[in-house]
Image (cartoon, helix red, strand yellow):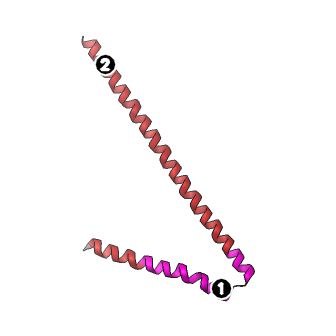
């Protein structure tokens, strides 16, 4: 039941946001002149570019963190193997 309500709320919100996103440009065509529409279009492109760059930066940071964690795990495995061999050599 909880998942159903959650899915319903997400669906309704996405429909509302989609409607606003689609209807906004048509309303702007009626109220703005061509120079202002060009400024709005350029502003929209700048916003999309900024969002894209932010997404790429976050993806790059995530990849770097994963590589760092893999390196740390690899070094840890090597250290454990080295300590085990030293203990075996010491015990022998």
Residue 45 at x, y = what percent? 64, 68
Residue 78, by quadrant, is top left
> Could you tell me how far apart the alpha carbons at marks 1 and 2 are, in whole angstroms?
75 Å
User: Residue at position x 66%, y 71% from top?
Assistant: 43
User: Residue at position x 50%, y 44% from top?
Assistant: 64
User: Residue at position x 48%, y 49% from top?
Assistant: 62
Question: Which label sits on residue 29?
Answer: 1
Residue 91 at x, y = what percent? 24, 13
Front: mark 1 or 2: 1
Q: Residue furthest bottom?
A: 30
Q: Residue furthest right?
A: 35
Contact (Cβ within 8 Å) of mark 1 with mark 2: no
Q: Residues within 10 Å of mark 1 (few under 14, many from 20)?
A: few
Left or right relative to 68: residue 56: right
Q: Main secondary structure of the magenta part?
A: helix
Left or right relative to 47: residue 72: left
Query: In the rendered structure, which segment of residues is drawn in magenta?
Result: 13-40
Name the quadrant of the C terminus. Answer: top left
Q: Secondary structure at mark 1?
A: helix
Residue 47 at x, y = what percent? 62, 67
Left or right relative to 12: residue 64: right
Q: Is residue 41 magenta?
A: no
Q: Which residue is mark 2?
A: 85
């Amino acid at each position: 039941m909880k998942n159903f309500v959650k899915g319903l709320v997400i669906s309704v919100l996405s429909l509302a946001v989609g409607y606003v996103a689609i209807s906004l440009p048509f309303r702007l065509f009626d109220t703005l002149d061509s120079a202002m529409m060009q400024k709005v279009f350029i502003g929209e492109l700048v916003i999309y570019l900024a969002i894209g760059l932010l997404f790429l930066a976050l993806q790059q940071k995530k990849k770097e963190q994963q590589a760092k964690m893999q390196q740390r795990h690899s070094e840890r495995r090597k250290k454990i193997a080295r300590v085990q061999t030293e203990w075996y050599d010491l015990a022998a």
